[in-house]
Amino acid sequence: MTDLFKQATAYLHGLTLRERILVQIVLLTVIFFLCDTFILSHRQSQIHTISLERDNIADDLITLDDQLLDSETALNQAKQRYIADKNAIEQAELTLQAKQIQIENKLNRLVPPTQITDLLRNLLSKTDGLKVISINNEPVKDITLTVDNKQTDSQNQTLLYEHAVTIKLSGNYQQLYDYLIAIEETGWELFWNTLHYQVVQYPTAEITLRVLTVSTDKHWIGL
């Protein structure tokens, strides 16, 4: 390396001033070209890296936009379901209130359990000739409704109670007919589901009638 440097130095000393200037210009040009090439290559590498980063950022932005759009869609769907469920609950509450009013109105028209026996006895005054053989209050029966609970199994809930009375009368057909008409014409509503008519000695017959009412009270009070 030292010999090569000495030879180059000796070569330069042997040149004329004009040749030395030309050699220096050539050397400077080569050095500038090499430096420029190195710097340009480094800049291009930086530009390429920045371009890749920019593309990655662009891809990330696209992914985020898609995720945001999916989130907004899911949120809108959840909002619509919430609104639909809320409307359904409100409608169900209105329907339940209407049904409760209907039930209350119906119960208010039914004869109270405390008055059913007296009512049956008092109606005898409107039918001459009928005689009471027996009158019995039956045990109270539960009226159950099946309620579907999503969190638990279906359960039976007792909301109403059936109060039934069996009355046995003695009389003829016309007297029975008049007694049933009297029941229908009272200011109260009363159900009857059993009517047994047996002729004992014509025209006298024994009549067994089962009548019932419904209430929210489980007990027979004052009967």
Image (cartoon, rainbow, N blue to C red):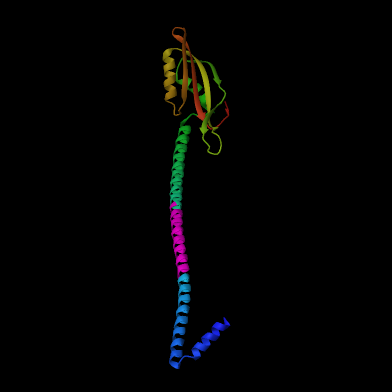
**Is 153 positioned to the left or the right of 16 in the image?**
right
Nearest the camera: 119 or 13? 13
What's the residue at 43%, 20% (across, down)? Answer: 180
Nearest the camera: 218 or 156? 156
Can you tell which quarter of the image residue 16 is in?
bottom left
Q: Position of residue 216 (x, y in %)?
A: 53, 32
Q: Which SS type dominates the magenta stretch?
A: helix
Number of marks drawn: 0
Which quadrant is the N terminus positioned in?
bottom right
Give the extent of the magenta segment.
47-73
Work out which residue is located at the far bottom of the displayed protein and give it.
17
Q: Position of residue 200 (x, y in %)?
A: 48, 8
Q: Position of residue 126 (x, y in %)?
A: 45, 20
Can you tell which quarter of the image residue 6 is in?
bottom right
In the figure, 116 relative to 58: above or below? above
Nearest the camera: 181 or 17? 17
**Residue 58 drawn in magenta:** yes
In the figure, 122 relative to 66: above or below? above
What's the residue at 44%, 26% (across, down)? Answer: 186
What's the residue at 48%, 67% (across, down)? Answer: 49
**Residue 55 drawn in magenta:** yes
In the figure, 150 relative to 137: above or below? below
